[in-house]
Amino acid sequence: MGNLGQEAMQFAFGIVLARLLTPADFGMIITIQVFTGFVGMVASGGMGQSLIRAKEASGDDFNAVFTLQILLGIAICSAFFVSAPLLVAYLHNPLYADLLRVSALSFLLRPFTLIQVSWLTRNMDFKKRALIDVAAGAAAGVLSVAMALAGMGVWSLVISGLVGGLITNVSYYCVTSLRLRLNFDTNTVRRHAGYGFKITANDFLGYIKYQSINLILAKMAGPAFLGIFNKAESLSRMPNRLLTAPTCQTVFRAMSMVQDDLDRTKYMFFRTITLLLVYITPMSVALWWVAEPFIGVVYGDKWLPAAEPLRILLLAGVLRAIGTPCGVVLAAQNRLMQEIIGQVLEVILIVTVCLIGLKWGLTGVAWALLINTVFATVYGYVLVYRAIRTRATQLVSAVAPALLLNAILVAVLASAHYLLTTLMPAAPFVYLVTMLVTGFVVYVSAFLFLPISALRSETERWRRAIQGRFGFRP
């Protein structure tokens, strides 16, 4: 629910900002995030994940990791202030220097967030995280819109992010029992560094893999092209951000607690895939059908070129509902070195296919990303097979409920599309609303009433929830 609240606000504020700002504004901030995000990921050292996975972790462990993180944050912030002119020389725009220096201030806030989020996650206390993240997101969103209305352009995205981070840290301090202090315990840091290094190496390669696309597009196609592609890519990931990320955070901690019990790990793995596909795929299918009117009505005509790459990238989003749980299993089982090899291959693949796909514009780059996602999903599942000895039939059984439900959804949407475009042509807004409402009603009905054995407990849970909330049982 916390993730849903954040996504809803980001979506709403994103609509407003997309109308107030230009694609080039978004392209510039994305370019800055390529560098700050990369360094931030390396600086974290994977130690937050190590604290979550560890069988035992005391307050001293958290304080030792915090001390290292705050020292790295100061060093990184200073380095960005000094090296900002190099980015200007590369991109030939003096504004990038100021943007980079102001954005670098976030490295003084990140250590507090990392440690306190790890503390709450280890204790499975997601309610506090949800409330704080939603409140901070709302404050940052309101500020960004106000600054955009005042004509501050790209600065409305930078400043609001810093304010949101500050609010988040203060709020976490108020609700957690952990009191951070400096603790120069090298033995503790070394104990978490081994696992953390593998997490960092894996994340580093994953970051290079995806951000290399942004760097290529920023340099060879310009910020406007990058801004449009990023809008399509961001929308395609929306279903995964809503459900995959928060689900896998919880599943990672659960798998870490039973890391020696392979049967329970295997059950959680396939059950996670089943439920993620059941909930994520209909959103992707519906968005695929209404991509163009959705972007036109919601974001405006200047963003319409994002529609076609969005349709392609939605296919990659569905595959991530399988690929991401694979990564969770490998992390919980400490099988990350094998995944790192796959990440190296993916970096080579994504750069190659992106450079080739760029010849065909936005759609060519979208197909390049899809090809990479197919490879990553297959490779990840092969590694999981070796770690916990799964069978192909188990994967087929896991995806079957979603295939059945979405086959029904596709048939209904195809009929509605024919009706609204051929027999009774409708305006874009009417088409959009009719398709979404029709798809929602049909899918929910099929989910609740079709006798699918793999979903029996899940549908029963929803029936009880509806009965308790509305007083009747479907």
Image (cartoon, rainbow, N blue to C red):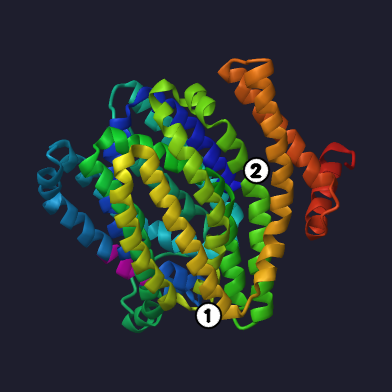
Q: Kindly indicate whether the residue at mark 2 contacts the one at mark 1 (C-beta within 8 angstroms).
A: no
Amino acid, disc 2: Pro
How many numbered badges does the structure rendering display? 2
Which residue corresponds to the image point at 78% horizontal and 46% vertical from the top-left? 447
- What numbered label is drawn on residue 56? 1
Q: Is residue 68 magenta?
A: yes
Q: Nearer the viewer, residue 215 or 354?
A: 354
- The amino acid pointed to by label 1 is Glu
Does any portion of residue 385 appear in the rendered image?
yes
Q: Position of residue 160 (x, y in %)?
A: 36, 37
Q: Quadrant of the C terminus?
A: top right
Q: Seen in the image, is 320 located left or right of residue 270?
A: left
Position of residue 61 relative to residue 35, above or below, is below
Q: Using the image, tell me which numbered label, if any, was put on residue 282.
A: 2
Main secondary structure along the magenta-highlighted residues: helix
Nearest to the observer: residue 315 or residue 102 = 315
> Which residues are the magenta region?
65-71
Q: How would you rate the neighbour count of disc 2 (Cα within 10 Å): few for under 14, some for 14-19, many for 20 or more?
A: many
Q: Is residue 174 above or below residue 440?
A: below
> Tag 1, which secondary structure?
loop
Q: CA distance from mark 1 to mark 2?
A: 40 Å
Looking at marks 1 and 2 on the same chain, the residue that comes earlier in the sequence is marked by 1
Residue 62 against residue 132 in the figure, above or below? below
Q: Residue furthest right?
A: 472
Horizontal arrangement in the rendering, residue 380 relative to residue 359 (left or right): right
Q: Is residue 108 visible?
A: no
Residue 40 lies, with reference to residue 11, above or below; the image says below
- Quarter of image, res 29: top left
Residue at 27% across / 59% down in the picture? 39
- Image x and y of residue 346, in percent: 37, 63
